[in-house]
Image (spheres, rainbow, N blue to C red):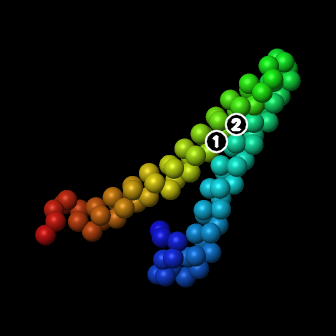
Amino acid sequence: MALNDGNRPGGTLADVGRFGGHGLTLGIATALFAWIGSILDERFHTGPLFVLLGTFTGFGAGFYSMYRHLVLDRSEELRDAAEERDPDGRSE
């Protein structure tokens, strides 16, 4: 689904919400894991160790979620659409 796909009514607004949701997921995952890391740092007196680990872990988890939804799910949609057009797998 391209951002400027003119075939769908209201498609641009839906895409803005969809991509904005992915950005929020990335930000919230990063902030949540950093916050958990700060709590662990206070409890174990380890300085910024767990904050840094939490930040990178949250960013990695949020990025993986975004990648999975934007790239992997999209490739499955395209493969399914190709199979619907040509169920035998033959091209003419």
Residue 59 badge: 1
Q: Residue at x 69, y 54 (%)?
A: 24
Query: Farthest residue toward the top?
Result: 44
Tell me if residue 60 comes above or below residue 37 in the rendering: below
Q: Amino acid at mark 2?
A: Thr
Tell me if residue 41 comes above or below residue 35 in the rendering: above
Q: Is residue 31 left or right of residue 61?
A: right
Q: Quadrant of the rendered structure where residue 37 is?
A: top right
Q: Amino acid at mark 1?
A: Phe
Q: Residue at x 65, y 62 (%)?
A: 20
Whether tag 1 and tag 2 are in contact, CB under 8 A, the answer is yes
Q: Is residue 9 left or right of residue 71?
A: right
Query: Farthest residue toward the front?
Result: 47
Tell me if residue 81 comes above or below residue 13 in the rendering: above
Tell me if residue 57 comes above or below residue 86 in the rendering: above
Q: Picture coordinates of residue 17 (x, y %)?
A: 64, 66
User: Under tag 1, what secondary structure?
Assistant: helix
Mark 1 closeness class: few <14, some 14–19, many ≥20 residues within 10 Å = many
Residue 34 badge: none
Q: Picture coordinates of residue 77 (x, y %)?
A: 40, 60
Q: Quadrant of the rendered structure where residue 90 is?
A: bottom left
Depth check: 30 or 10 in front?
30
Q: Quadrant of the rendered structure where residue 59 is?
A: top right
User: Under tag 2, what secondary structure?
Assistant: helix
Q: Picture coordinates of residue 33 (x, y %)?
A: 72, 36
Disc 1/disc 2 C-alpha distance (Å): 6 Å
Query: Farthest residue toward the left?
Result: 92
Q: The C terminus is located in which quarter?
A: bottom left
Mark 2 closeness class: few <14, some 14–19, many ≥20 residues within 10 Å = many
The residue that label 2 is drawn on is: 55
Q: Residue at x 64, y 34 (%)?
A: 57
Q: Picture coordinates of residue 81 (x, y %)?
A: 34, 64
